[in-house]
Every structure is written in structure tokens, then in C-alpha cells.
Image (cartoon, rainbow, N blue to C red):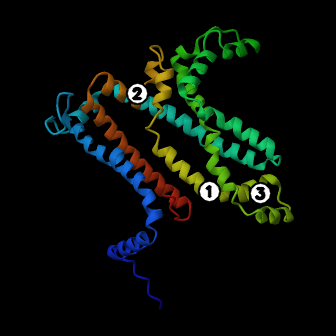
Amino acid sequence: MLEAKAKPTLGVRFKKWWRDFVHQWQLQSMAIPGIVYMIIFSFIPIYGLVIAFKNYTVIDTIDSAQWVGFENFKIIMEDKYFWQSVVNTLGISALKLAFGFVLPIIIAVMIYELRDSVFKRVIQTISYLPHFLSWIILGGMIITWFSSNGMINELLNFIGIQTKQNHMLDVGKYWWIASLSDVWKEAGWGTILYLATMARIDPTYYEAAKMDGASRLRQIWSITIPMIRNIISLNLILSVSGLFNSNLDQTLVLMNSQNQPKAEVINSYVYRVGLMQGDFSYATAVGLGISIISVILLAATNIVTKKLNDNQSVL
């Protein structure tokens, strides 16, 4: 009976890494600037999370601020405005996930199936373009389109629905406007990973399917989709783990005094409380709590996708 191969110890793995580093030091050293950047801007600031457990003000240092333990978290649990921002964040994120997760897959498959290379590049360019426009520009366009005299009302009047309503002031419509505008902006850009993966599919699979009499739709369902399953799983994991992370730029541009009850999301709430009102400890506590929940969602979604992918982990 064959014995299982022993897993190398940490010391053995380090020696192997060091040997490879010495032999390829010119190539390996190119990663040093990125590592230094990560340490300075990602790891060192983690120490600042301690102010979530303190009563920190601008005249204090992190060490000198008064320790209050979980007091900030208790206040969070009783803050109705925080919970309203949570509801708004989850509502908008759920709509974005429902429409924005599947749409890039559909667009990618449609682009991949195009045979005219020039037309394919034109479609790709058009679909990518909104991603490169800032929310300042897109927000201005959306506000204009949904205004009383905007394009949306003109279209509604054209089909016989007479209205002069400013839709950006309608609280009940904000979630749809925010989610669908974000999907429109990012759907084309979201096709890149799918198209890159599809480009690596062996054409002989499709040739064999044609010989077996498979229709184009059957080829897409039986060959293309399974081949991009890992990328679909990865995007699903990242999308679900980001349910509590809303688009701050979009919110700050589209939010106004009328739609704020439905527009205030967690990130804008943290921005308002932390930077505008100066309650840094409370804002940090909110951010820390949401980050922990996001990590839990990331791990849980990874476990689920692993079960669905025959125990093959994506992350």
C-alpha cells in the first residue's frame, strides 16, 4: 500500500523559497516596491482600528485616547440611522447582484459568439466606455435624464404616459435608479475576465459538438458555460462578500435631501459621521463591524461554491 507523501515543513518550504529567491533575485526583487506599498498603506493602518474601542478625538493620540471598550458598538446597535443605512445598502446591493451578476456573462457570451472581429471590437469598446467615466459625469447625466424635463419623461410622454415628475426626488425609485445605473456602468467591464477565459477554450470542443449535431445554444450551455465556471464562482464570491460595501461616489452624487432616507448607505453614513461630524471612533467601529461581516460572507460563499464545484476551492 502506498504511503501518503508527507507535507514539507515550514522550514523546508522557506529554504526552497530562499533558494529560488537567490537564483532569481533580479526578478523577485521587482515585487519589493509592491510589498512595501502594501505594508505602509494596508498593514500599518490596521493599528488604527484600536480607536473603535476608544473615545478618540483630534486632540488625542491613538495611545492617549480614553478606552471605552465596546461602548461604540452598543451605540451602533441602538442607532436607527445606522440600521436604515444597512437596509438601504443591502437593498441596493441585492438589486445590483440580481442584475449585475448575470448580465456580464450574457454580454460576454454574445460578444464571444460574434464572428466579425471589427464589429466585435466596436461592441467591446462601447460596452467598456461607461466604466471609464467618473460618477461626477455619469451622475450629472442621470440627474438630467430623470429630471422633470429630462429624457425619461420625454420617452414616457411619447408612449402616452404624461408626467413631469422629477424621479430623483422620488424616494421609492432611488434603489432602482442607483442599482441599474451602476449595472449599466460596470456590465461591459465585467465581461473582461469571462472573455479572457473563453479565448482559451480549445476550438476542437466546438468542432466535436458540431459533428454530434449540437446547436449553437447547446454548445454554449454544455461547453462555454462549464469552461468559465471557476470565474463565475470567483465573481459570485466577491459579489456576495461585497454586499455591505456600497458605492460611495455614486451615493454622494445622486443623494439629495428628498431621497436621503433611501439613499443613505453604510459608506456614506460612515463618511458623514466620521469626517463631517468628527466622530472617528464611532465611524471606525461601524467600519470594523462591517469588515468582519464581509469576511464571514466571503468565507461562507467560498465554502458553498466549493461544494458546488466538486470540492474545488476558488479562493
Residue under the image location 32 percent in, 35 percent down: 286
Q: Residue furthest bottom?
A: 1
In the drawing, does residue 181 fall left or right of residue 204?
left
In this view, the residue in front, 21 or 184, is 21
Local SS, label 3: helix
Crowd around label 2: few <14 · some 14–19 · many ≥20 (10 Å): many
Q: Quadrant of residue 79?
A: top left
Residue tagged 2: 268
Q: Mark 1 and mark 2: span between their CA atoms? A: 34 Å
Crowd around label 1: few <14 · some 14–19 · many ≥20 (10 Å): some
In the drawing, does residue 47 fall left or right of residue 129?
left
Query: Could you say where residue 55 lies in the image, as x and y percent from the top left?
Result: 18, 32
Residue tagged 1: 229
Query: Could you say where residue 307 lies in the image, as x and y percent from the top left?
Result: 51, 60
In this view, the residue in front, 225 or 188, is 188
- Considering only order in the chain, which callout, 2 or 3, is on the residue closer to the N terminus? 3
- Considering only order in the chain, which callout, 2 or 1, is on the residue closer to the N terminus? 1
Please tell me how many numbered marks the rendered image carries. 3
Residue under the image location 20 percent in, 32 percent down: 56
Given the image, on which type of amino acid does mark 2 rest?
Ser
Local SS, label 1: helix
Residue tagged 3: 219
Q: Is residue 292 visible?
A: no
Query: Could you say where residue 88 lies in the image, as x and y percent from the top left?
Result: 45, 29
Q: Quadrant of residue 310?
A: bottom right
Local SS, label 2: helix
